[in-house]
Amino acid sequence: MSPIPGNFDVVWTETILHVDMDSFFVEVERLEAPALRGVAVAVGGTGPRGVIASASYEARRHGVRSAQPTATALKMCPSLIVVPPSHRKYADVSTQVFAIFRSITPVVEGLSLDEAFLDVGGLRHHHETPVGVAVMVRERLRTELGLPASVGVASNKLLAKLASEMAKPDGLRHVPHSTQDEFLGPLPATALPGVGPATIAALQRLGVVTIGDIAELPEEVLIGNLGGVVGRTLRSLAAGVDERGVEPDAEAKSISAEETYPTDLQGRDVMEAALLALAHRLVGRLRRAGLAGRTVTLKVRYPDFETVTRSRTGVTSTDSWRELYHTAVELLDELRPTRGVRLLGLGVTGMEPTEGHRQLRIDTSPEWERVEDTVARVRSRFGEDAVTPARLIDGPP
Ligand SMILES: [Mg+2]
């Protein structure tokens, strides 16, 4: 059926989809272990510093949340089954999820392993409505991969993301342009992006509870209490205005890998081995995204949570594990940690796309096999479940 001519432009106003897989790590585990279906289950670290990475909705009903210490989660829900994470498996399934997204539209901006914005505006000659595309995305994820996803459909990123949150779990929410004020108004002001503790405190002093309250405040009052930049930004977000376009992944800002260790790392050799493992993981992510970056950043967190970073920008971009590893070691030299290290992170920014043929060449090289061996040795030394949530770009899954 072809679109109704008079409705053509109206129907295609809301072309931004926010697709968010539901309890992604848990659902991937359930594919292989049907006994995990219908029960309270979480994926997370099982060591003394274990943290929940993803919780089933059955577990969430007991108060289990991602980023919660596993020990707390088990107190809230004693029957909780905790499955240690298998990051390689999640990354593989994520590649399949994104392959489905990219088979629908090239304008895909990944936010994490399991979450992306899709701009489907280019599909107006192939589908009746953007909602029809959203229905198809959910069906394909369900039938081809066996995974549930929630989708928000709206005229911009802000509204689409809020809509997918409200659609969860396993739902679809469409926010027609003409009803966006009714949609936004009752939501809490804290649902807006970038509203941190200082802003919340200032808004509370103004008696603001909902997004609708912000929209009703005179702009001078907002600016007088929050400053020009924050005041104006909040005001336009509360009005449902968001001019950001969907940036395809070649323009992704950063890709990183980090790990919190079950016991603090002590000594140079141990830290170097850990950096090698991180460089390996980072290269895996860069390759999947088809990207290389010019600026390498090392992050070090000490047991008291003091966190320091050092960066170096190269003349050319890199996705080579060897270059990343050597740069990381040089940055570690600059930082000279004189005490134990709780967390290490390695990231790159300043992205450029790489050619598609490179992966095959590097994956079959003897160097690559050697690093694989080294990584296996590192893993056997630190243990597989010394792993906290993997984050692609940023944000918890
Ligand atoms: Mg998700």
Image (cartoon, grey):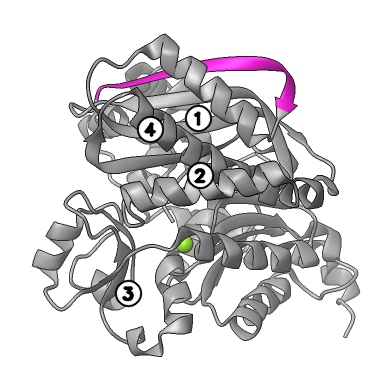
Front tag of 1 and 2: 2
**Mark earlier in primary sequence (3, 2):** 3
Mark 1 neighbour density, 10 Å: few (under 14) some (14–19) many (20 or more)? some
Disc 2 is placed on an element classified as helix
Residue located 81% across and 76% down the image: 128
Quote the CA–CA distance across marks 1 and 3. 34 Å
Q: Position of residue 89 (x, y in %)?
A: 52, 66
- Ligand 1 closer than 8 Å to label 4 CB: no
Disc 1 is placed on an element classified as helix
* Residue 240 relative to residue 353: left or right: left
Q: Position of residue 27 (x, y in %)?
A: 44, 75
Q: Of the numbered discs in the image, which one, if any, rests on residue 344?
A: 4
Q: Of the numbered discs in the image, which one, if any, rests on residue 374?
A: 2
Quadrant position of the N terminus in the picture:
bottom right
* Residue 340 relative to residue 274: left or right: left
Q: Of the numbered discs in the image, which one, if any, rests on residue 57?
A: 3
Q: Are marks 1 and 2 in contact (CB under 8 Å)?
A: no
Picture quadrant where residue 14 is located: bottom right
Range of magenta residues: 306-317
Quadrant position of the C terminus in the picture:
bottom left
Mark 2 neighbour density, 10 Å: few (under 14) some (14–19) many (20 or more)? some
- The answer to whether residue 298 is visible is yes
Q: Of the numbered discs in the image, which one, if any, rests on residue 233?
A: 1
